[in-house]
Image: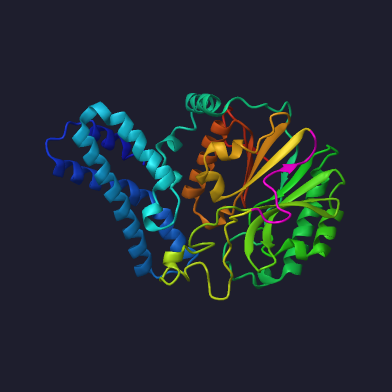
Amino acid sequence: MILAFPVFLWRALNVYTAKVTALQGGFLWGLIVFGMHFHWLAQLLLQHANASCAFCLFLYGCLVVYGALTTAVWFLVMSMWRSLFFIPVFLAYWFWVDYFFLYPLGFGMGYPFINPLLSLVSYQPCRLLLWCIGVLMYGPTSQPLALPTVLHLPPVVSRAYHYDQPWRCNSDVVGHKLYRQLDRLAARLNAQPWSFVVAPESTFMFPLHKHQDLIHLWSSALPPSTHMMIGSIYKDERGGHYQAVYWLHGCLIINVYVKKMAVPIVETMPAQWRNSCLHNLFLKEGEGECRSMTKQLPGCVDYFDISAQVRVIPQICLEFYCNSGATIRRHLNYNTYNYVFLFLNDSWFNSFFCSLLYRLAVLKAQLIGVPVWYIGHDECRVIMPNIAPGPGAQC
């Protein structure tokens, strides 16, 4: 993306003499940019979906060509309107990519992971500008004087579909392995009234509310003042499965947050693709789909009020990235300190896409103006608004 961007600027600022030149230039630029970008998808299909090389190349090629067609139209519009509307058209295209790119393919979402700003969030002036834009759009927020103690509990099943761990489907074995990790973490916890142990999305891939014995076991390893939040599965009365975050404290499930946007193809299948060759890429036969929450489920909430001074707003993976800042800001309590806990299963992706996930989290944190804990399978970092992220403060 960074290498191709100067070529784009030089080409786009030219006054095109023919529409066909604009189409060709836009299509070629799209092939370069999307071809370089979507290599992470090809690797994901080969490593985790066990797709054949031919099928992988076909899907990868289709997505790259689709992206190139959108840039061809973009360049054509710019050539018709000349430099007078260059900036509005530029901003309109990237807004469409962020929020609507995958709508024509039937997935009902945008694709924010190729935003040009992701290459700039490492620089303090860019973060300061984003923070100011967030204040202008949504208003200021109260900043905490001190951050709580947050410790990271890595999953014991750390990679998607690793079949060399046959015990991964045994809830008791997974639960006891997590207990041993918790026992080692307990020595690092202090007596703060709101210290946290956090575990990422898909740490316990079973309905946790049906395993009260494990909740008691885990709680026995933690100080009484510690709150635990763990990515697991919520199963409703009709048998629907949902990715969820459970808030545990004092041997009890205090509350449950349910993911509102399931990942297409990986967790759920759009209706128009249910009978296609894509269905069994990740949703293997016999495994239930995870649903998107279309209405509030009984016993589930949008945030966790830890005390009268602290509110935690959980977000699970895709919903944080695809929602606008206003969606999260709606749940803030301006009379308390607010923290966003972002739970991800980033074990699916290569280092390139994981870096994009983190950069986009930095961008979002500046806009919403509250601290964000990036809780992945291998690491946990805290992102402060308008503060240099560097490598990120580790949990």
212 left or right of 6?
A: right
Residue 191 location, quadrant: top right
Residue 24 appears in the rendering: yes
Q: Tell me residue 334's x, y (percent).
A: 69, 29
Residue 329 location, quadrant: top right
Image: 57 above or below 250: below
| Residue at the limit of the structure toward the left, as seen here | 17
389 left or right of 24?
A: right
Q: Residue at x 14, y 44 (%)?
A: 20
Residue 8 location, quadrant: top left
Image: 234 above or below 120: below
Q: Which colour scheme is used?
A: rainbow
Report the front residue among 162 and 29.
29
Report the front residue among 220 and 300.
300
Residue 31 appears in the rendering: no
Q: Tell me residue 395's x, y (percent).
A: 69, 41
Q: How many marks?
A: 0
Q: Residue at x 54, y 37 (%)?
A: 325
Q: Tell me residue 250's x, y (percent).
A: 86, 51
Q: Is residue 337 magenta?
A: no
Q: Tell me residue 227's x, y (percent).
A: 79, 46
| Residue at the limit of the structure toward the bottom, as seen here | 286
- Span colored in magenta: 296-308
Image: 119 above or below 218: above
Name the main secondary structure of what is drawn in magenta.
loop
Image: 206 above or below 320: below
Report the front residue among 350 and 106.
106
91 left or right of 184?
A: left
Q: Residue at x 46, y 48 (%)?
A: 352
Quadrant where the N terminus sits is top left
